[in-house]
Image (tube, rainbow, N blue to C red):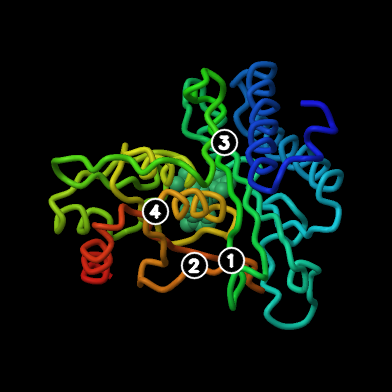
Amino acid sequence: MPDDDIDRLDDQAFAQWLAGRAGEALTALRASRGFAEPRALKDAGDRASHELMLAALTRYRPADAVLSEEQTDSRRDFSSGDRPARLDADRVWIIDPLDGTREFSEEGRTDWAVHVALWERSAGPEGGLTAGAVGMPARTGADDGPLVLGTSEPTAAAADGPLRIAVSRSRPPAFVPELIERLGAEAVPMGSAGVKVCAVVTGQADGYVHAGGQYEWDSAAPVAVALGAGMHASRIDGSPLRYNAANPRLPDLLVCRPEHAEQLLKAIEGCR
Ligand SMILES: Nc1ncnc2c1ncn2[C@@H]1O[C@H](COP(=O)(O)O)[C@@H](OP(=O)(O)O)[C@H]1O
Ligand SMILES: [Mg+2]
């Protein structure tokens, strides 16, 4: 897309463009490096996507702050002492340049993603997410190009049968077996928080539950997409998800179809 056209994109369209652009770079990297050295491929992917996104944000959104997984001090708790610029900024892009890094480095897997979210102070007493895009570069969208979901996705139709709960392939919460048993549900393991949330949005799963560790960039863009599609998104105790906090740790979440929220929150509470 020509520079002038990118200049004219609103925040949501820009988020989708950026997720797509970083996804193209990641796909090219996978093709050129192959899968013989997974560690090196993961590192190269994280770095290349972060640098591309940061350069684009600097160029097209120069006044805004950025919180990226790949930044120095990204995981630092700023609750006391130093204060990073993002805590006083009105607009903060919260990005995960490569989510599902493990799956990115495994040949044939498509469950990895690029996350781009915008947090704005004006969106509520604690600020809120006002734009978001999840790119899934190894999956194909309706236009035959790489799949990018935004905040205006249609709500998928409800499915019959047991609840399908998406969980981490490699680090599912300890309570998942008990939760599945209580609900008579089915666990659907897959990589990437973004891919799991999008599975709920597109109707391949009814919910996604995670606990035990995560950071704001893992869920910000996926949650913006989920909320836009009318899904429920909260901490697993039902409290709100807050972004651009002094401490970027956001260790657990539940995203699900709204009609299952009460049942799922109750069942999770019973397992903890
Ligand atoms: N216990 C934990 N502590 C910290 N991060 C975690 C975590 N469990 C999952 N994550 C992060 O959440 C994202 C989705 O995880 P999963 O694929 O297992 O569902 C991954 O992001 P990255 O791939 O960006 O590192 C992963 O690192
Ligand atoms: Mg991540």
Q: Secondary structure at mark 2?
A: loop
State how far apart marks 3 and 2 are (Cα).
Answer: 21 Å
| Label annotation for residue 241 | 2
Left or right: residue 113 compared with residue 85? left
Q: How far apart, in angstroms, are the residues tagged by discs 4 and 2?
A: 15 Å
Secondary structure state at the residue bearing disc 1: strand
- The residue lying toward the viewer, choosing from 90 and 195, is 90
The amino acid type found where label 2 is placed reads: Leu
The amino acid pointed to by label 3 is: Gly
Alpha carbons under labels 1 and 2: distance apart:
9 Å
In percent of the image, x 52 and y 18: which residue is there?
Answer: 144
Residue 205 drawn above or below residue 240: above
Indicate the position of residue 6 as horizontal and vertical percent values.
78, 36
Answer left or right for 162 relative to 242.
left
Residue 21 location in percent, x, y? 69, 31
Residue at screen point 49% across, 25% down:
141
Check disc 4 and report its element: helix, strand or loop: loop
User: Alpha-carbon distance for marks 4 and 1?
Assistant: 16 Å
Q: Residue at x 41, y 60 (%)?
A: 233
Identify the residue under disc 1: 128
Seen in the picture, residue 55 relative to 177 is either above or below; the reply is above
